[in-house]
Image (tube, coloured by chain):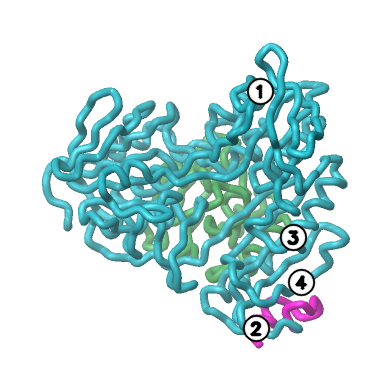
Chain colours: A green, B cyan
Amino acid sequence: MAKVTYVEHNGKEHTIDVAEGLTLMEGAVKNMVPGIDADCGGACACATCMIYVPEEWLAKIPGKEDMEETMLDFCEHTQANSRLSCQIKVTPELDGIRVSLPESQH
Amino acid sequence: MSTSGTNGIVIIGAGQAASQAVMSLRSEGYEGPIRMIGDEAEPPYQRPPLSKKFLAGEIGFDRVELKPVEFYANAGCELLLSTRVAAIERAKKVVLTSDGREIAYDKLIIATGSRVREINVPGFDLEGVYYLRSVADVHEIQKNFKPGAKMVVVGGGYIGLEVAAVAKKHDISVTVLETAERVMARVVDPIVSHFYERIHREEGVIIRTGVTVAGFEGEGGRITHVVSGEGESFPCTFVVVGIGIIPNTELAQDAGVTVENGIVVDEMTRTSDPDIYAAGDCTNHPNGVYGRRLRLESVHNAIEQGKTAAAAITGKDKPYNQVPWFWSDQYDLKLQIAGLSTGYTEAVTRGNPAEGRSFAVFYLKDGVLIAVDAVNRAPEFMMARQLIAKQAKLDPKRLADESISMKEVANA
């Protein structure tokens, strides 16, 4: 388990215990956190599960693969710290992570 | 809120559109009761992985279900699973279940999805002949993934080819039989069909096009051969049939709701009955981008119409107007399709489909981009999705020129 805090664009916070092995996307979608659409269910096909990950946490997460990188490159609200949450597996090192959500996924 | 009364909302169907509708009804502020009626044993789950990672055994049901089952109780949604609806009585505003229950509604959402088209040839009922639509189907098919197994796939569409790719990974010998002259003929240009035929052959799958299936033969009630219309015999230990789906519109039709190649809805998912909405595969809906009616078989459509129905029921009309999109995973290939290519006047290829495993085909109609098929080409897919929505007119020469980036093509 890792405690993950999702911060909606309007500032509303959701702190959830996410099981190891699930992705940050699944942790949100299965627990009714609004703001992550994840149309494709985690196939890295739709880019509707973007999150912003603070600098200090990015180092604890494996880097982006090409597919994720290019998908993000074409999203409307992409920033330097954007990630697709379906590509990030929850590990014990991520306990306490805070991620924030974009204004919209489209 | 436009919903009055105490019976609340009943959803027929327990798939992606139904699950989304529950989520969206609550986030739109609806507080009344919700009942979801589904004929399968499982709570709503995703179907796309069934022919991909779930069939391959790479993920379990916990990764396929849309929400944990407690979600529905927490959201105040009663799940009536393994339950079929026998009829909708619009005059009384009730649905009748096949086990004799009568469930009243204030508003009804029909999200009945679609079912497989069955093959009607001698031997259709032999053991070892499967379709792939549900979790239960996958479990049956997986029992046949054994050393020395020989599979014949009937139908070279998305499902058939995805199953072929997964089976090949399990060292099963695979033959795909397709009636048309090329695979995926209904959904993509010949350039893309021929590319996929090449890849499957490189992976060791036997692809036979222009072959009709005349019948299945067996021994002791179990399939041993597929026989073609030309009299050719294909030995096998099991068969997977993937020849399309049929929208589940009978309940609506029998109740007198307007049905015409799908349940007819408007851009707010309203049917011809003001208290009944419909969402997902079962609908025939208007699409503003293309200026015509569509019936789509896709997750994206189910999700968006689920949202639209919830918004309309809670009095916040959010017209549905989306560029359809689809994807297919086969081997190391991710095919992403945006838009619908029907009626295109020019197909422009970017990259080389005759070699390697990455290219895109853009479909233009009188110069306007209407669709893209992108194989391992995320930039082309992502950019095209935006350009199709804008009905952008593009220069085919620049689209085909890989020295010009997709962003530059779009900004021209």
Estimate the spatial distance between the alpha carbons at disc 1 and disc 2, rounded to whole Å.
50 Å
Give residue B241's position: percent from left, percent from top: 64, 36
Q: Residue at x 72, y 45 (%)?
A: B178
- Give whichever of discs 2 and 3 has the lower sequence position: 3
Estimate the spatial distance between the alpha carbons at disc 2 and disc 4, rounded to whole Å.
13 Å
Estimate the spatial distance between the alpha carbons at disc 4 and disc 3, rounded to whole Å.
10 Å
- Name the amino acid type tagged 3: Val
> Residue beneath label 4, please?
B349
Is B406 contained in the magenta span?
yes
- Give whichever of discs 4 and 1 has the lower sequence position: 1
Q: Residue furthest bottom?
A: B412
For the residue pair B154 and B404, the one nearer the viewer reads as B154
Estimate the spatial distance between the alpha carbons at disc 4 and disc 1, rounded to whole Å.
41 Å
Q: Residue at x 19, y 44 (%)?
A: B90
For the magenta stretch, what is the residue range? B398-412
Q: Chain of mark 2?
A: B
Q: SS class of the residue under badge 4?
A: strand
Magenta residues, dominant SS class: helix
- Name the amino acid type tagged 1: Gly
Q: Residues within 10 Å of mark 2 (few under 14, many from 20)?
A: some
> Residue beneath label 1, please?
B128
For the residue pair B109 and B312, the one nearer the viewer reads as B109
Disc assigned to residue B394: 2
For the residue pair B336 and B271, the one nearer the viewer reads as B271
Which quarter of the image is occupied by the N terminus of chain B?
Answer: bottom left
Give residue B31's position: percent from left, percent from top: 21, 47
- Name the amino acid type tagged 2: Leu
- Give whichever of discs 4 and 3 has the lower sequence position: 3
Q: Is residue B152 above or below residue B182?
A: above
Disc assigned to residue B192: 3
Q: Name the front one of labels 4 and 1.
A: 1
